[in-house]
Image (spheres, helix red, strand yellow):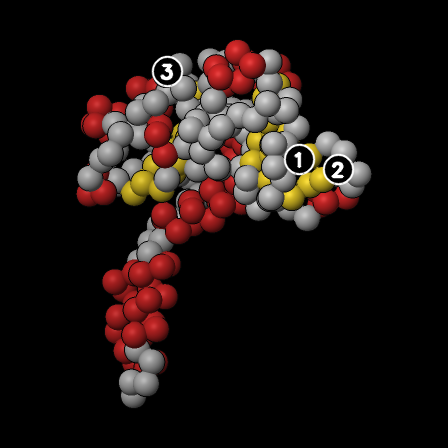
Amino acid sequence: MMKILKLNAISPVADDVFKGYEYSDKAENPDGIILRSFAMHEYPLGENLLAVARAGAGVNNIPIDKCTERGIVVFNTPGANANAVKELVLCELFLGGRKIVDGAAWAQSLKGQPDISKLVEKGKGKFVGQEIIGKKLGVIGLGAIGVLVANAAVALGMNVVGYDPMISVEHAWKLSQRVKHENSLDELFAACDFITVHVPMNDKTRGMIGRRALSLCKKGVRILNYARGGLQFPIPVSYTHLRA
């Protein structure tokens, strides 16, 4: 019986898929490995290992070179969690535009105080935010996730610009005609109120959000990174609102 090792918790949906295999987080010397964010670079590759599968888009946590030398197949599942990430980004657009978290924490601090309604009326002005309708959103990377985010933002009334010199024909067909193409990252950084990043991490993209990029941005820009933390250099939080 072939053995499949889970290095992370995997959706129970996979249990039916791997019926007939020894499929667990305790499988020894497995024929296959399935993982999400587990860092495999120092993980021993057993003699029986034939394939490594990542339940996600990126494969930067898998030692591709070592696997290639051994003839171990590595594959991912691009788009599998695209809608979930899109919804998180939309949530963050609202959170980034309004002081919702701060306001909720302040409201909790009023518990037990008399005349709460008067306190709320007096203090709510501290949490005034801005509507996202009419604001400009820059989407860096128009793959499975970026296209969904861009189209959803258009539907919310945002002005959306996208940058992706490597966009596929498939994703171009899916992109709303109301998403405008930006010619360079510098132009995108300078123009947008919100920026969201959806690119893989490699030698070309590592640290793409750094001091230089932020120096080009509008004051108060919100930058969302739901891809990989390594896409941004360590930057003082005072520069902008970053989410890794």
Residue in the image at 23% along x and 43% along y: 237
Name which quarter of the figure residue 222 lies in. Answer: top left
* Residue 13 placement, left or right of 171: right
| Mark 3: amino acid | Lys
CA gap, disc 3 and disc 2:
39 Å
Task: State the quadrant of the N terminus.
Answer: top right
Q: Residues within 10 Å of mark 3 (few under 14, many from 20)?
A: few
Alpha-carbon span between mark 1 and mark 3: 34 Å
Q: Are marks 2 and 1 in contact (CB under 8 Å)?
A: yes
Q: Secondary structure at mark 3?
A: loop
Secondary structure state at the residue bearing disc 1: strand
Q: Amino acid at mark 2?
A: Tyr
On the image, numbered disc 1 is attached to which residue?
A: 4
Q: Earlier in the sequence, mark 3 or mark 2?
A: 2
Identity of the residue drawn at 42% across and 47% down: 92
Q: Position of residue 130 (x, y in %)?
A: 35, 50
Residue 88's spot in the image, x, y percent? 49, 45
- Give the residue number, with chain letter if any, for mark 2: 21
Q: Nearer the viewer, residue 180 or 147?
A: 147
- Mark positioned earlier in the residue sequence (1 or 3): 1
Please give the residue where the numbered disc 3 appears in the rendered image.
Answer: 204
Distance of mark 2 from mark 1, alpha carbons? Answer: 7 Å
Q: Is residue 13 above or below residue 184?
A: below
